[in-house]
Image (spheres, rainbow, N blue to C red):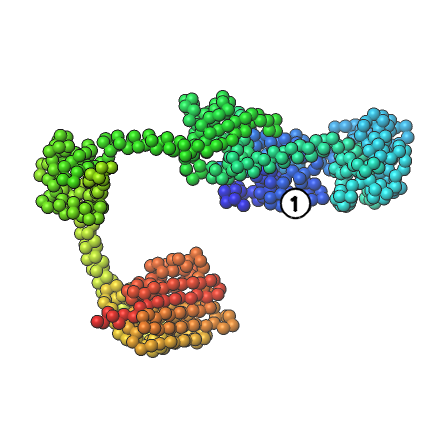
Amino acid sequence: MDPKLSNLISHHDTQSWAHPHAYLDFEGKVISIGRLSDELITPVHEQPSQGAYFPDYLYVEHREEFLLCFAKAKTQQTPQVSKLLLLEQPEEYLRYSISPIIHHGAMVFLVFFEKIKIPLQLTETEGDAAQHPVQPSSGSTIEKRLEFIAKATLDGIYDWDRQQRKIWGNKGFYRMLGVEEGQDVDIQEWWTNQIHQDDRPYLLEKIAWTFQHKLSKITHEYRINRPDGSYIYVLDHGYILYNQKQEAERIVGAITDITQMKEAEIQLKASEEKFRRTFSSAPVPIAIFRSDDGSFVDVNASFLEFSGFSKRELIGQSAGSLGLHLLSGKGSESAEDNVAFELNSQKRSELEFSTKTGEKRFVLVSSEWVQIDHVACVLTMLYDITERKLAEEKILENQRLVNSINQNLTEGIYRTDDSGNFVYVNKAFIELFGLKEQEGGTKTSFGALFSEGKKHLELLGKLANEGCIKDEEIKMLRQDGSQFWGLHSCILSKDTNGEVFYDGAIVDITNRKQYEQLLEDKNVELEKINKELDRFVYSASHDLRAPLTSILGLLNIAKYDVKEPVGLKYLDMIKTSAERLQKFIKDLINYSRNSRTQLNIEEVNFKQLIDETFEELKFAGDWDKIRKELHFQEQDGFYTDAYRLKMIFNNLIVNSIKYHRFRQEDPYLYIDVTVNQDKVTILIKDNGRGISQDHLDHIFDMFYRAAEDSEGSGLGLYIVKETIHRLKGSIQVSSKEREGTLFTIALPNLISELE
């Protein structure tokens, strides 16, 4: 589902609505369904699924009214309410309410279904006859009326006696079947021979479903085979009588010949399909607009590709609301007015608009009037003339460029000959150096503008050798003797006669140079502050560590004197908090030491280093529940900072223990160390909890904790990353929840640092 539509639907608390309802897209297809009961849709269908064409799921006699309201809701973009529609049960009616909703450019239609009960206001006799068709009694008024109707109507009237397996019908009924009037028709033979074989399974299923649910009315379309081999389409309306056992006893109904209507529909569909194929496959962008408001009715694939919009974004929207602008110059206030005027006043025009990505396009528009669904529209074909228009604009742009050089540019532009005499300078150049205009053009020499006397000769030599100079920072000299920093670029060029010229530009960067100096001073000051802060953190951490150690010692002693369970519990809580603070202080000390102290390069024995780490952690909780697997491929002569390397191992191994899954069959920790002459590659892998993808990009951030139950400071992995950075290495991580985590570390051999 489109995210915009999903957000719109979720914005409305549809589940709390009492009425059945549905969301439809612009074409009438289902987006979502809520509380839609079977009695509101065709009985033989299940609930409409997402993407299904919703009118196909309605009663046949309800579709026309629904489609009429839906069309009005789309064209007028206002809520529409249908007339009352009869349901299966007596005195029960259905009413649709269709409301268009626009949210962030997306249009959907909210359809409410309201069931209304209206008591019949008929006499007892007529009311019973209207609601429950019965077998006419001899000589009754109802019998006479039925007889007159059967003779007068062109429709086929029938009475199907299911007990006797007989069908009585009028002339129209037999004429439609292609059999002689008065002939009794065996029900089995009739269904077998007369109903089109493609329609028969569906009808049988629908009738069985209707009988099963004890409905009193059934309507369906199907085809009847005729003796000459042809077939006709009919619309069949039937009313069902049930006996005391609630068995369907008989059906009284009427059949209408709708063949001409169906053939007209088929021809219309064929014509529409032919137009649609031509329209869709045309290489030229084509759009169809309403003539009254300029809104899009349809567009072909070429138009979508050309404009960059999707069909959903265009249909129902006005051209002006999408940034479409005409070059007609009619002076109307809005783009929509321009479009409507242009489409109504001439068949060819030049149009300027922006694609969805903001790219400006120019087209020649050819328009023709067309009628679509009884609405006056304009079919518009677009011919891309962008290149021609851009070429025209380029000529104008070049003309404006010459004027801009003289009037608007802040850069000083100049041309000199090979002797350093000015041939041309712009207004900005004259203002930059404080020259008089005639001096800038004739008297002032190129060399007189440099603070350093021979700098211009150095530049001319470089130009002669390399052909250009770019972004040279040079001290320049104004006419009044003041100096400024200029950013100088220049190229050597020749005219058609081979004469040499130097074309250049100078920008005053004095302020930028001052800001650069200020930034450099600030950086020096910031480095000083950072060093002082590191010293403070290191000193404060050490000062806190001693009293904290004393607190932990006193807590252990206090446990011998305190016997009450509550008191012991409080002592354990204090100890846990103190140990957490002690771990945090240790992390601060490690961080400070890593950033403050120099590297202590020495030869490393990886197996010994990891064994020492394991020995220090063997009393950690759950240590003995993990299988450790170590692999070493070492060579002599690998050098790095052993203390920092051990700190890396300690943090990663502790995390592996802390966030493992001990209830699985084989919790393990795998470490592989591969050393060669230039570097070491370390793999640390486990099958623990893993890290979700949402957290994976942030685990090396300072104070970031990926696990909700984490009791750490969030510094561990940050220190690992910073330490590896100090060792000039890299670390990568891959992880999947409930499968485990793999850290890959690469460290260079720092033996060269000893030399």
Q: Residue at the far front: name it.
A: 497
Crowding at dot 1, Cα within 10 Å, few <14 / some 14-19 / many 20+, comes out as: some
Q: In the rendered view, would you say 553 is above or below 336?
A: below
Q: Callout 1: helix, strand or loop?
A: loop
Q: Quadrant of the C terminus?
A: bottom left
Question: What is the x, y in percent for residue 741?
Answer: 43, 65
Name the residue rendered at 84%, 37% in the picture. Answer: 227
Considering depth in this image, is 526 or 120 the residue closer to the camera?
526
Q: Can residue 551 be seen at all in this image of the molecule? A: no
Question: At 83% from the left edge and 27% from the top edge, which residue is drawn?
Answer: 149
Q: Is residue 462 above or below residue 147?
A: below
The residue where tag 1 is placed is 47
Q: Nearer the viewer, residue 158 or 303?
A: 303
What x and y, as percent, mark residue 453? 9, 44
Question: What residue type is disc 1 on?
Answer: Gln
Q: Residue at x 40, y 63 (%)?
A: 733
Drawn side of residue 602 relative to residue 157, left or right: left
User: Where residue 300 sits in the image (x, y, percent)?
Assistant: 54, 36
Which quadrant of the figure has residue 276? top right
